[in-house]
Structures are given as C-alpha cells and as structure tokens.
Image (cartoon, rainbow, N blue to C red):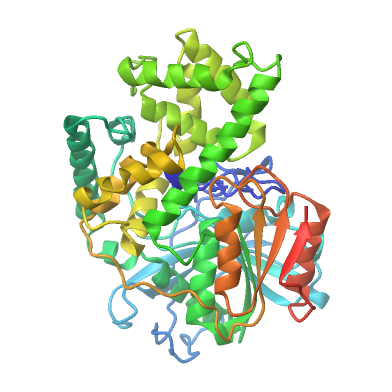
Amino acid sequence: MSDMRNRVHVAVLVCLVAAGCGDGIDEGANEGRGERGTIDGVTLDTPRPDDSTDDTVGGGGSDDTPDTIAATDDPFEWNEVGDGIEEGTLDVPLDYDDPNGASITLYVVRHRAVDPARRIGTLLVNPGGPGYGGSGLAYSADGIYGQELLDRFDILGWDPRGTGFSAPAVDCIDDYDRYFGLDSSPDTNAEREALIDAGTDFGEECASSVGEVLPHLGTADSARDMDAIRRALREPAISYFGFSYGSELGATWTTMFPETVRAAVLDGAIDPTVGYLQQNIQQAAGFEATFDEFLRQCSADTGCAFHNDADAATAFDELSADIDAHPLTVDRDRTEVTQAVLFTAVADAMYDQSYWPSLELALADLQDGDGQGVLDLYDDYFGYLSGQWGDELEAYFAINCLDDPGSTGPDDLFSHEDEFAAAAPRLGRGWMAELVFCSVWPVPPAAPVAITGAGAGPILVMGTTGDPATPLAGTRRMAQALQDGHLVVVEADQHTGYGVNNCGDSTVDDYLVDPTMPLADEIDCT
C-alpha cells in the first residue's frame, strides 16, 4: 500500500499523489498521460507531444557545471499548444558523471505569465509521486495556482526522468493485478514467499525493459535535471513549488544547488531525518489515524452507509478478516477482492474526505457480497482506466527503491513487521508488499543526499493537521532540518495544504512573489 499513489491532492483543487485530492493533486495529478488526472476537479489534459528534438544542455553536469548551453536561442524548441501554453523537450545526460555520453529527453510544458510586464521569472512545479509527470500542472495551471502566480510567473512543469512523456519512460509490466492483488499482509511463510517472488519478478522485468537507465532515475539526478532546465532558460536563480514527493525533490535540489534557489515551497513534506522504512511506518500511522476518524464519523452518523449500528470499526475488522480468508471474485479477468485490494481502496479514499462517501458505499456493498465499489477504488489508486494501466507505479518503484530500499533484504524487512502493526493495527502490515519489492530491487541504492538547504535562503514548508500520507510531525521536521525553513500549518484531513484556505494560499503566493518577506518560524493557518 503506502504512498505509491501519493496523490498530491492540492486542495485547491487538487486533487495528488498524493497521492494525492487531498493531495491536492489527484495523484495522479498528472499521470504524465493527458487523458487522466485532475486537480480539484480540473482535468490535467496534457497533449501528447510531438517528436522530441536533439537540443542539449552543454556540460551536462555535476553540481558545479558551468552555466553553458548549446549554441541555440531555443534549446527547448517551444511549440504553442494552447493560449499561452507551450510544450518542448530538453536533452540532458543520462549519467551526469559522463556528460558527453548517452542522453535522455525531458518533456516540458510552460504556462506563460499572464502579465508579461510584471513577470518575475520561472516557477518550476512538481506534483509528487514519485513516478508522475509534472507537465499537466503547467497545462492546467489556471485551475491550480493563485492569480498572482499566474500573472507573474512562467509556470513550468516537466515529466521527471523516467516518467510521463519524457523518454525513455519506465514501463516494466502490463498487469498490476498479478502483483498488487496478492496478500499484502502475509500471515504464513508461503504468503511471504509469494510476495518475494512477485517483487523479484517485477524488478527483473524492470531491469530487462529499462536496462541502463534504471541506475540513473534517482531523486538526485532529477535535481540535476532541474538545474539543467534552469541553465537552458538562462535564469541565474529560479523558483520552485512541489507537492508531496515533490517536497523531497525540492529539498534535494535546494541542498545541491543552493545558489540557484530564488524561492521554494514544499507542500506535504516527508520527514528527511529518517530513512524510507521509518517514513513508511510514520505514513502507516497517518493513514490509520485518518481511517480511525472515518470510522468514528461513520459510527456517529446514522446516514453513513457503513454505520453498522454505530460500530463501523468492529464491522470493518470483521469484514477485513473475512475477505482475507475468503477473497471475492468480481470479474474473472481481474484480481479477486483480497485484503490487499481492500486496504488499497481504503488508502485511496483517505487522501481526501470527498472520497469518503464512495468508501462508505463500497464497504457496505462488500458486506453484501458485492466487491465492485472496492475494486473501483483500487483501480482509481493505481490509475486503471478503460482497461489500461498507467506506468506510474513502475516509475515509482524505480525511483524510490533506488533512493532508499528501506532494508537490506526480505529477512531484514520482515523483522520490522511488528513495528508496522504497532503503529497501525488495522492497516500497518499492508505496507509489507511495497517494501518487499524494494528489498529485492535489482539495482544498488544511490548515494543519499542529507537535506540541509544550507545557503538556499528561506524555504516555505506547508503541512495539514490531518495529512495521512505525510503526517504533520514529519513535515515539521522537514522545516526544522532546513537551514532557513519556515512551516505553514493548515487544518484539513487531506494530503497537502495549498488550496485549503486563504491564509495558507496567500502565505504561499506572497512568499513566492517576494521571498524576502518576513516569515515566522511557524505560521498558523488553522
């Protein structure tokens, strides 16, 4: 389970991604695929790009690469695709340690500043994931960002390496059910071995299909791509706004390239002081707390479809145990509704309270022997649409497992199983499946980047009081880890806070327009 769908629900909207939206961006906020993804009801309709160009960023670089670009006035070869919206591509090194070697192509969309006379510069944006393209945020910027940001910034979203329309994109498998319908909270050695076998096969499929690209998809390389974009734009310093995993990417970028940071907003930030395993334990606790609130409210409301005589909690526990023992067939061509499918459906709904009525009905139907509603939420989580799976989850694993697999192997991982159960008694052990996949990932982990933001200037971090995916305590630790971090807190049971209220939005917008404005260490927008 976990934050695979980090649906960045930017509450403005958004809906991702977070994933999420509570994640603000219906995380799939941008699935890098024009036909899917919404932010607060706004469809992220990224057009399919034309063939990529051969323009390159010169020098490629390491962290100290000089600001040189190829001899062209337009390294992106921008092409207008809408009113004030352009698309382009940029070639960057596959391996920044070998800048003259193989290259990859980033797909980029730019929403031009509405008021060019007052234009400040470029605002890079990322929806989270990881694994989701960011080009849709720029294409749908009018429905996401405040008018002052639209007026004064070119809002530029790109599909990070390995995602969306950037090439090559990670595409390992064609059927998620085979891997993610399995029991995600194994009770027996046989169930554990089934997960390990599935994770091993998944990794081997990625290694076979992605090949030499797989070791170069980490967050640090994406941060280097951000600097390559900045250099190609010829901007000495640039601004950034990232949701969910985009906060980790942004914090990494501010640490690696502090002198190029004009301003940075990190909404729905992870805890950078602990590793991937502990982050997932924190996340399990966050989802459990939000689900407890869902069950409490349902029990108190006779109109809740899953009311169960004011004891929705006990009813869910019994239902979960029954599905674990007796999976339900909905469609013979699809996965059964297993406990893993049920837990995924719950996780999907926890990103935003607007999903809660759908979960009420799905749980009530499941009690009556109809699993379609639960399967629909599972499909929503994984981006299954019109009989097709997106590729976001493959990219998610390729990036996350490279950054930090969370364990040294399955035995090490399962030694922490009780910690997940203690943090989240109902849902916690469901995190085992994702972490098993990383525990057998075929590529060694990349060197970690210790987040400091030293020298980057003031950085604004945003969190919500009831964020299931990136709990507020961890977001607060992100602000504290940054040399000049400032936290804005908004009250909401959702992932990410932009769009929740005027106080939070105006704080973000005003800071991005003028990052020299005075900021308290913590700003209360509850």
The relative height of residue 328 versus residue 67 in the rendered view (above or below) is above
Residue 165 percent location from the top left of the image: 45, 55
Q: Is residue 409 visible?
A: yes
Q: Which residue is drawn at the image coordinates 52% and 55% (left, top)?
A: 128
Q: Could you say which is closer to the camera, residue 379 or residue 192?
A: 192
Residue 59 percent location from the top left of the image: 40, 87
Residue that sits furthest to the bottom in the current view: 66
- Say which quadrant the N terminus sits in: top left
The relative height of residue 31 versus residue 342 in the rendered view (above or below) is below
Q: Quadrant of residue 221?
A: bottom left
The relative height of residue 220 versus residue 196 in the rendered view (above or below) is below
In the rendered structure, the answer to whether residue 155 lies left or right of residue 376 reads right
Residue 289 percent location from the top left of the image: 56, 39
Residue that sits furthest to the top in the current view: 368
Q: Which residue is drawn at the image coordinates 46% and 62% (left, top)?
A: 160
Q: Quadrant of residue 279?
A: bottom left
Q: Which residue is drawn at the image coordinates 41% and 72% (left, top)?
A: 220
Q: Could you say which is closer to the camera, residue 440 or residue 261?
A: 440
Q: Is residue 109 visible?
A: no
